[in-house]
Image (cartoon, rainbow, N blue to C red):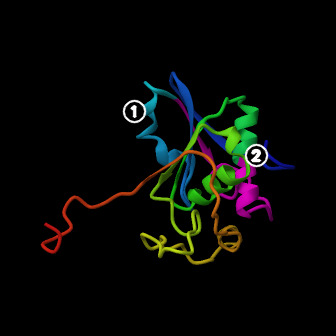
Amino acid sequence: TVDKDVNLEVLDFGGSGSPLVMLAGLGNTGHIFDRIAPKLTDQFHVYAITRRGHGASSTPPSGYGVDRLADDVLAVIDVLKLNRPIVAGHSVAGEELSSIGTRHPEKVAGLVYLDAAYAYAFFNASQAPASSPPVLPPAGSPVLAAIRAGMQKYTNVRAPALAIYAVPKDLGPAFP
């Protein structure tokens, strides 16, 4: 339970070592990590969270702004009594990472952006974004519309961070 009448699905993949909390991209659940999480359990105790409005988590009528979603993550960390976990997020979860890293960097050991450090997650006005943001699904549901409306541009992430992007193995003849 992270808010009044809001319960989140939290997966515990087990493992030994420091806690690692994984956040899914928009439209996904914590189960998106079912195949990779077991490969990390030899070094981390791995958890995954399904954000509100998705999967088995509650779908309240409100509470989809990025800071509220990040507060949900922090509430799970508190309930599980995790000591400064690493928090990794995919895609739009980069927003939640940046919210945590801006407002509560002391609560995490570090942030890992998995194809997630777009301009809405880290914004530098002096530079053009290194890559285009992902195409978000149309606002066909109130949950997606609320998440889209809650996007912010973070400029002061104060927690240690690592950004990882997928690049195709073969970019074609123009890129030998």
Secondary structure state at the residue bearing disc 2: loop
Residue 162: x and y in percent read 47, 48
Q: Residue at x 16, y 74 (%)?
A: 174
Q: What is the count of numbered marks?
A: 2
Residue 53: x and y in percent read 69, 58
Residue corresponding to mark 2: 7
In the displayed orientation, state which residue is furthest to the right.
4
86 horizontally vs 100: left or right: left
| Residue 14: quarter of image | top right
| Disc 2 versus disc 1: nearer the observer | 1
| Residue 152: quarter of image | bottom right
Secondary structure state at the residue bearing disc 1: helix
Q: Which residues are magenta?
A: 45-72
57 horizontally vs 160: left or right: right
Residue closest to the eye, 18 or 61: 18
Residue closest to the eye, 38 or 152: 152
- The mark that comes first in sequence, 2 or 1, is 2
Q: Distance of mark 2 from mark 1, alpha carbons?
A: 27 Å
Q: Residue at x 54, y 73 (%)?
A: 137
- Note whether 24 is above or below 85 in the view shown: below
149 horizontally vs 61: left or right: left
Q: Amino acid at mark 2?
A: Asn
In the displayed orientation, state which residue is furthest to the top.
16
Residue closest to the eye, 72 or 167: 167
Q: Which mark is residue 39?
A: 1
